[in-house]
Amino acid sequence: MNKPTEKGLAGAAEADRKTVTRKGGDLIAEFLVKEKIPYVFGICGHGNVGLLDPLYQVRDKVKLVSPRHEQTAAHMADGFFRVKHQPAATLTSTGPGSANIVMALAVAQTDSSALLAITANVPTSQFNRGPFQELNRHNQADFPNVIRPVVKRSFQPTRVDMLPLALRQAVTTMTSGRPGPVNVDIPFNLFQEKAEVPLEAAAEGLGHRRSGASPDDVKRVVDLLAAARRPVLFIGHGVTLSEASKELTELATRYRIPVISSPNGMGCLDMRDPMSLGFIGRNGAYPANQAGRHTDLIIAIGARFDDRSSSSWMPGYSWNIPASKLVHVDVDHAEIGRNYVPDLGILADARTFLRQLLAELERRSPRAGALAPWHAQIQGWQAEWQKFTAPNFETHASPMRPERVVADCRAVLPDDAILTCDVGVSHNWYMQFWNARRPQTMLNSWGFSGMGFGAAGVLGAKLAAPDRPCVSVTGDGCFTMVPHVLCTAVEYNIPVVWVIWNNFGWMSIRDIQMGMFGGRELGTAFYQGANKTPYNPDFAAWARGAGVEAITVTKSQDLKGALEHAIKANKPYLLDVHVDAEVRPPSTGAWQLPPTPYKEPVFGKRYLPDIAPAK
Ligand SMILES: Cc1ncc(C[n+]2csc(CCOP(=O)(O)OP(=O)(O)O)c2C)c(N)n1
Ligand SMILES: [Mg+2]
């Protein structure tokens, strides 16, 4: 997809629109070049080799990267988009190759990340005969039905002359409005067959057609803000995607409105700013949950109140809606009113809305100092939280204390470094304590929590930001799902660092088992033999075997130095860091897994206001 230009429709020159006889495969390759899709992450098969040759012809402009598993291909495209806000493509073959990307597409879909998934299918002349790798129990060449729930749209052109329209609609769809993955499923005869076809350009997508709020609604928001005594902003990935960090920062710092962030919004406001309260929910920061419970006005922008950022919608743990008034701004109308009915719902792009709000505030210049008691209350919560958590950031231990791992990573990584998180206990700690300083520097698999996203996505992130350190913090379980990433880093010389949070098990799930099922453990820890000796591969030796340098870190004194060394080496590097599994993140909200009973917060408590303010 072209980055914004002044030209309106993505500048296909007159000549491009001319009908030319071409092979379908050539048309696709030319289309990728025209749309400035820089990478195709793909794995070959008999079904897509017909497209590899056209890609060979354009190899200077569109690079093919071939990881060792399709899941990784899609995570790479996803990571690339999240850092650069420019989509890449995946290419998979018929049947199993394409089936392997389903989970990674779900990750992209649930976190609004754009990628163009080109899947090959069986030839049209063999539809319904049950050829090799056709899924046809209910419909011919039925892969689009497999993939449908995990993409924004699936297209299945069945003739070469259907390709131009399908391709341009696919690209327009993936980057307009709320971004997401889109599938073009192509019977493989189309790669070689010819037709007289034009090359159609997609309409400009991301960052274009930024619709705003109506002037009346902007005024109403400022009225609400002027009346509020305890306002908060709740921001999510929508603010990151609309690149509204500057506007958010101005709003928060100039008008001193505290900001609570969902993980994919982290860094839009530098989290060192006193107005940044961090993440909310069970694994959030105490000041964020306290502010969420006590606020009288929430302005939510590009955030969706999922269970993990709302304490499963139970009143008084993270939020008190409807006692607190809610303005909900989003580009996707499906999110407005999904979980909480807002007092005011606004369908608008985050950046446009923030600019409108700033302009209206400027015009009205609200009374300074009105929020002083609220700020004082918040500072009190920040001090309590700081006092409770600070000692553990310094603790020396072997295996390491989790907080210390987070703190040492923060100390070593520069502000613009990119952290890709994986799934599990380590992620809980990073959500609670990581201080993202810039937008698009903390990538999370939030909506789907797909294991392997961090370890594989970091490769795509590094391709998008070759000059910045890119580090994946990944669990021993997560990494073991995608260990082939080592090969890809070596083959393509992608110097990323993996920090394996090694606690010898699927410990986030073990902790649920321990807490809710009488302490009986089954299938949640890694061991060997009858007497259950903890087991893991020697990750460092494994990495070295793949040609990746590696260090095992068992003592807290060694992590900083090892990480500094790994980053400086500017080569693929793996650190196997042994972390104490018996230290659990302090919950500051709640999370419900019905029907099992939920636990009360370890730090902080439920708060329900006595009187709901009049609507
Ligand atoms: C692909 C996939 N399979 C299973 C799960 C369920 N799950 C969530 S966390 C987790 C354990 C993660 O283990 P590890 O990476 O070692 O992290 P830890 O919790 O030990 O820190 C599992 C199995 C998932 N989210 N994704
Ligand atoms: Mg683990």
Image (cartoon, helix red, strand yellow):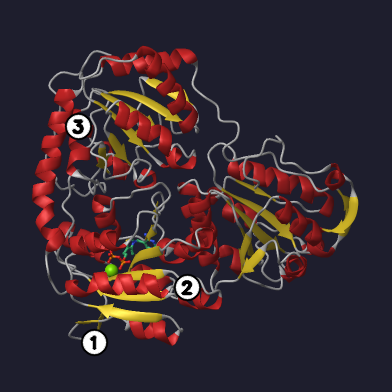
- The reply to whether dot 3 and dot 2 touch (C-beta < 8 Å) is no
| Coordinates of residue 559 in the picture (x, y in percent) | 24, 71
Q: Nearer the viewer, mark 2 or mark 1?
A: 2
Instruction: Quickly name the residue at label 1.
Output: 529
**Residue in view at x 57 percent, y 63 percent:** 99
Number of marks drawn = 3
| Coordinates of residue 387 in the picture (x, y in percent) | 8, 48
- Say left or right for 200 vs 357: right
| Coordinates of residue 62 in the picture (x, y in percent) | 68, 62
**Residue in view at x 15 percent, y 52 percent:** 586
Q: Secondary structure at mark 3?
A: helix
Q: Amino acid at mark 1?
A: Gly
Cβ of mark 2 under 8 Å from ligand 1: the answer is no
Q: Residue 105 or 352: which is nearer the viewer?
A: 352
Instruction: Quickly name the residue at label 3.
Output: 293
For residue 47, what is the image quadrant? Answer: bottom right
